[in-house]
């Protein structure tokens, strides 16, 4: 999943997270911030401070998300095919926490990937 | 797994080299033939001799290639036949850690820039500065270049010989370092000696095997595959040729090389001891960097090719490596270029003999090179470049090199991971926080933690933990490290190395802690993060096994009387930080609060007493007595019996820890450890809860007061300060107060005198320390006529008056005048004072001036000052003032003064800090900064929360 120098890169990665059952709840083990109803200028992870996307703000140690390779600061583009770039915070949360889905596939982009791609194009 | 990688890397490298060398040789031979150069005729007789650094890199026309192929087998055989010594050639890789500025890398950190600063930050200083690759001919030659030369003649005929020699020479010399980096890609991997008897074919097949990694866009087309490969190999240092006959296809076979292993040990040794022997070399290397650059180029064969490869000729050239060696693109890019297009032919190479160091962007580009060893060496070279060089570090960041390195932490090859981590360690070191932030921003912390979990190689673990230690000195990263790494650090390092066992085996005796570098680095990291505030403390306290393991390690240190080392210091500092505010922060703490004066309520009692006193000074005596009685009762009071053994954070404040800290205070010669241990006692004896009461009594029963008083004589300012504050908190216990008044007054007053007239130059006490001492005196004197008498007997009044008159510090003057005011409040003493010639004005005016500015010195204010003492100190800690609360102090300790300062503004704690030292100040300022400023880790959440009602941050 992670970027390996020398390999072809895409700025987007697919991360598949198998939810962990904790009691009644299925957890993913990360937290999100952002959304079109949030103040994007407060987002420490975005380069463009008007970006109202959903970002990963925390990843619990050893949790399903970390195991799957999700990282803090990742921007979530899609969840199981649903767009996440134009949703409210709560919509995103609901989309991620659907009880009927034990596995979520995230389409994620991260700065390091983009930079790597840019660099490889430059060089 | 690592071994595997190393070996396979080694074997691949070896095969590459072998192939390359052969190819070059052949090429060379052909060329020579073609040209019919007279000079070369001699060589033609000994085909092996042609070393072909140059040749290998050059694109050959198709026809040529064909020829080469056809000839290969014969050629190689010839070379084999001729080269009996080949098996002897070995390549060694040595990794040396060096401390740039300081010869002993480890020690450097502790002390610091300004007296105040203690930089825990990173001992990390020791850096793997260099990796040297050298080829050694075992048999004929000693590891040094010289013997080789002597051995040269016999080797002469063989191309390899020539190559090796070059290598050696350079390798042996200071230059070695650089050469490693560029040279080659392979340099870093240990390679074993391999017999060359195998058919040349073998190398080809191996080469093919290697191809897949290069398969990228840059990879050679199918058509020229075979040829290209050798060309690529060029990137690898030419060295020994691998060659166990059977082993070709299976790289693993090569593993056995003892050398690889040896290298490891060596590098370790270097680590631990600062690598005394190696250092000289490196030192030189650094100094001579420019030349080194040329040296890199070193690939022996290339040079040879240029000048005809005469051994004899080359030797003279040696010292001045430049000319013969030069080859234009030998640099890092050279290999890259070659991938894409063949580098210039031999001829063109000759025309441009100059060689240059790769530019930083080129080095960074090599991090993405398809060939793993190139990546590894680029990272190693980067590490070398970044060593203590802020400019380069900045540029690496600007060129977006950090994400590349972080990505390499997950690389399948152990060597690549190791080198990348080494580079990150150097890049993360220093006061410049931008690199630390950049590493965080590209997911460096989780990646490092993953690597730590996966790595079994000790060196890698040292590098990872060292890097984390560096990162942990940056405030905003502390919570990130806790979030991602606390569990891992605790369970992978702290617990196993501490010797603590969850289920102690009754048969075997408890294990001792191992003071490994990994443990030291990890404890340093945790020490830093433990200063991040209430949330950080909570996380650490609740981390299963952490407190238990730290205590076990410390007990083991005391048991072995090994209490001066850095690991112990780190552990004590963590303990001190975790002890801060235990009485408020620990789950269930309210159950133990002494809200009402119970049988044990000495603390509460004293509070009340003080309040009463404030309004009516006359009442002290009687009340004092009463409290005294209570305390006396307490003396005989048994400590609570526990039904089950304390564990986890409960251990922090069990009275049993008192003995541990007192042992450290008695045994240790490490000032930081002393300060931290005193600070821990200070933290534990603060607060109005039951456990603090027990602690205060236990210190007395364990005869800790004399130990503390003795430390008031310490030459180290911060130790005096921590001890003074601890004594102040301890004197909340009435009996302690009496004892301290009797036995410590002389020492305290001596410190006051030293504040004005340092006994020796440079021994001047810091303002904070003086204020702390004065506050302690004030605390002891309040409420105790006997202690006030002691102060007079110790001739404290003249010292205080002089301080008020002469001190440059407003705070010192205020604190001193406050003491004087208290003394004057005892009517019983006025006669004596007047007899000595003092007038009321001396005392009152001082007090008045003190009051003036603040307007808060009224008796009420007085109360505050005294009572809050404990709390105040706590607050102070929180804010980051070191005096009061060691924990913060410690944390910063790790860092530096700078850190502390930064932190204060943030937490709005500045007020709190000030309050600590000035007892007279009112609380409002103190309280303004609430305890929990913020959790850095969750910044997004917090920030957003302010702006909008919606959930900013949701766990999913």
Image (spheres, coloured by chain):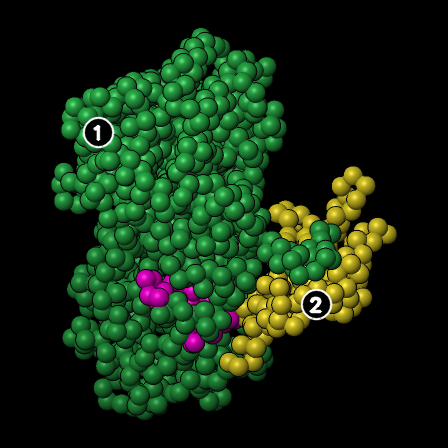
- Percent of width and height locating residue B840: 24, 32
At numbered mark 1, what does the secondary structure look like: helix, strand or loop? Answer: helix
Q: Is residue B605 left or right of residue B34?
A: right
The correct choice, above or below, for B704 with respect to B194 in the image is: above
Label 2 resides on the chain identified as A
Viewer-nearest residue: B309 or B837: B837
> Residue at point 48% right, 10% down?
B637
Q: Is residue B476 left or right of residue B186?
A: right
Viewer-nearest residue: B705 or B56: B705
Choose top left, top right, bottom left or bottom right for residue B21. Answer: bottom left
- Percent of width and height locating residue B796: 21, 29
Viewer-nearest residue: B614 or B312: B614
Task: Verify whether residue B613 appears in magenta.
Answer: no
For the record, the magenta segment spans: B361-390
Indicate the colour of chain B.
Answer: green
Q: Which residue is mark 1?
A: B796
The correct choice, above or below, for B187 with respect to B691 in the image is: below
Q: Which residue is mark 2?
A: A53
Task: Verify whether residue B370 appears in magenta.
Answer: yes
């Amino acid at each position: 999943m992670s970027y390996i120098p020398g390999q072809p890169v895409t700025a987007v990665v697919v991360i598949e997270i198998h939810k962990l059952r904790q009691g009644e709840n299925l957890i993913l083990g990360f937290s999100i911030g952002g959304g079109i109803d949030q103040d994007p200028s407060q987002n420490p992870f975005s380069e463009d401070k008007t970006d109202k996307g959903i970002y990963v703000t925390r990843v619990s140690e050893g949790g399903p998300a970390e195991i799957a390779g999700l990282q803090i600061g990742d921007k979530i583009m899609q969840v199981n095919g649903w767009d996440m770039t134009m949703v409210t915070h709560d919509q995103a949360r609901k989309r991620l926490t659907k009880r009927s889905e034990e596995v979520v596939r995230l389409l994620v982009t991260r700065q390091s990937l983009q930079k790597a791609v840019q660099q490889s194009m430059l060089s | 797994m690592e071994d595997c990688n190393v070996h396979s890397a080694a074997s691949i490298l070896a095969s590459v080299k072998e192939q390359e060398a052969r190819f070059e040789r052949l090429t060379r031979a052909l060329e020579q033939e073609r040209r019919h150069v007279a000079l070369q005729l001699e060589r033609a007789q000994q085909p092996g001799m042609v070393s072909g650094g140059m040749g290998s890199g050059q694109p050959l026309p198709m026809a040529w290639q064909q020829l080469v192929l056809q000839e290969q087998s014969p050629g190689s055989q010839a070379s084999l036949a001729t080269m009996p010594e080949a098996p002897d050639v070995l390549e060694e890789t040595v990794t040396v850690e060096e401390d740039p500025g300081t010869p002993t890398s480890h020690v450097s950190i502790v002390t610091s820039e300004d007296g105040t600063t203690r930089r825990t930050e990173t001992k990390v200083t020791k850096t793997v500065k260099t990796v040297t690759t050298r080829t050694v001919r075992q048999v004929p030659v000693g590891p040094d270049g010289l013997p080789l030369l002597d051995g040269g003649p016999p080797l002469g005929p063989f191309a390899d010989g020539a190559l090796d020699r070059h290598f050696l020479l350079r390798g042996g010399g200071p230059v070695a370092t650089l050469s490693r980096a560029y040279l080659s890609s392979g340099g870093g991997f240990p390679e074993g000696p391999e017999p060359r008897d195998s058919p040349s074919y073998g190398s080809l097949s191996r080469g093919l095997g290697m191809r897949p990694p290069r398969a990228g866009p840059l990879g050679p087309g199918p058509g020229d595959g075979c040829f290209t490969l050798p060309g690529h190999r060029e990137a690898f240092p030419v060295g020994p040729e691998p060659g166990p006959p059977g082993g070709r296809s299976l790289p693993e076979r090569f593993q056995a090389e003892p050398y690889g292993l040896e290298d490891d040990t060596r590098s370790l040794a270097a680590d631990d001891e600062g690598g005394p022997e190696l250092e000289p070399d490196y030192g030189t290397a650094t100094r001579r960097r420019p030349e080194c650059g040329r040296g890199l180029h070193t690939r022996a064969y290339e040079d040879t090719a240029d000048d005809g490869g005469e051994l004899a000729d080359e030797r003279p050239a040696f010292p001045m490596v430049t000319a013969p060696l030069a080859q234009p693109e030998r640099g890092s890019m050279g290999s890259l270029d070659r991938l894409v297009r063949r580098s210039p032919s031999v001829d063109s190479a000759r025309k441009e003999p100059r060689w240059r160091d790769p530019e930083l962007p080129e080095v960074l580009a090599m991090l993405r090179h398809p060939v793993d060893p190139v990546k590894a060496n680029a990272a190693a070279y980067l590490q070398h470049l970044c060593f203590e060089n802020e400019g380069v570090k900045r540029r690496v960041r600007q060129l977006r090199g950090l994400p590349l390195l972080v990505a390499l932490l997950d690389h399948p090859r152990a060597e690549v991971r190791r080198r990348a981590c080494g580079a990150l360690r150097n890049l993360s070191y220093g006061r410049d926080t931008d690199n630390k932030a950049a590493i965080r921003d590209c997911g460096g912390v989780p990646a490092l933690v993953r690597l730590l979990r996966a790595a079994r190689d000790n060196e890698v673990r040292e590098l990872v933990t060292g890097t984390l230690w560096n990162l942990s000195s940056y405030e905003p990263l502390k919570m990130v490290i806790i979030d991602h790494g606390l569990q891992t650090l605790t369970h992978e390092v702290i617990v196993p190395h501490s010797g603590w066992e969850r289920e102690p085996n009754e048969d075997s005796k408890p294990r001792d802690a191992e003071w490994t570098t990994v443990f030291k680095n990890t404890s340093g990291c945790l020490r830093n993060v433990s200063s991040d505030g209430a949330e950080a403390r909570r996380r650490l306290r609740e981390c299963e096994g952490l407190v238990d393991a730290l205590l076990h390690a410390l007990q083991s240190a005391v048991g072995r009387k090994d209490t001066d080392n850095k690991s112990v210091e780190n552990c004590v500092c963590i303990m001190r930080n975790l002890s801060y505010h235990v009485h408020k922060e620990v789950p269930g703490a309210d159950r133990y609060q002494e809200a009402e004066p119970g049988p044990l309520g000495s603390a509460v009692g004293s509070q009340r007493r003080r309040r009463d006193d404030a309004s009516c000074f006359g009442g002290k005596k009687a009340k004092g007595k009463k409290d005294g009685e209570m305390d006396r009762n307490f003396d005989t009071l048994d400590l609570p019996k526990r039904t089950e053994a304390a564990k986890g954070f409960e251990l922090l404040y069990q009275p049993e820890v008192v003995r541990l800290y007192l042992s450290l205070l008695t045994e240790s010669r490490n000032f930081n450890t002393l300060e931290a241990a005193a600070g821990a006692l200070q933290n534990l004896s603060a607060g109005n809860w039951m456990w603090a009461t027990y602690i205060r009594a236990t210190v007395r029963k364990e005869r800790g007061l004399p130990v503390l008083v003795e430390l008031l004589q310490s030459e180290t300012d911060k130790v005096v300060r921590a001890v003074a504050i601890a004594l102040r908190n301890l004197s909340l216990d009435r009996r302690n107060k009496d004892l301290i008044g009797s036995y410590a007054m002389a020492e305290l007053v001596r410190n006051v005198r030293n504040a004005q007239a340092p006994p020796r130059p440079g021994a001047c006490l810091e303002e904070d320390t003086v204020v702390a001492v004065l506050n302690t005196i004030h605390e002891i004197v309040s409420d105790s006529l006997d202690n006030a008498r002691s102060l007079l007997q110790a001739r404290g009044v003249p010292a205080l008056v002089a301080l008020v008159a002469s001190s440059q510090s407003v705070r010192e003057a205020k604190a001193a005048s406050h003491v004087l005011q208290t003394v004057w409040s005892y009517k019983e003493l006025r006669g004596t004072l007047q007899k000595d010639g003092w007038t009321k004005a001396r005392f009152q005016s001082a007090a008045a001036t003190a009051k003036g500015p603040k307007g808060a010195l009224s008796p009420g204010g007085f109360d505050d000052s005294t009572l809050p003492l404990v709390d105040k100190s706590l607050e102070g800690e929180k804010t980051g003032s070191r005096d009061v609360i060691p924990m913060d102090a410690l944390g910063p300790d790790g860092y530096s003064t700078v850190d502390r300062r930064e932190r204060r503004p943030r937490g709005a704690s500045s007020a709190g800090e000030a309050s600590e030292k000035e007892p007279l100040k009112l609380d409002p300022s103190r309280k303004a900064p609430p305890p929990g400023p913020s959790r850095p880790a969750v910044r997004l959440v917090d920030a957003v929360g302010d702006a909008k009602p919606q959930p900013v941050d949701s766990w999913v």
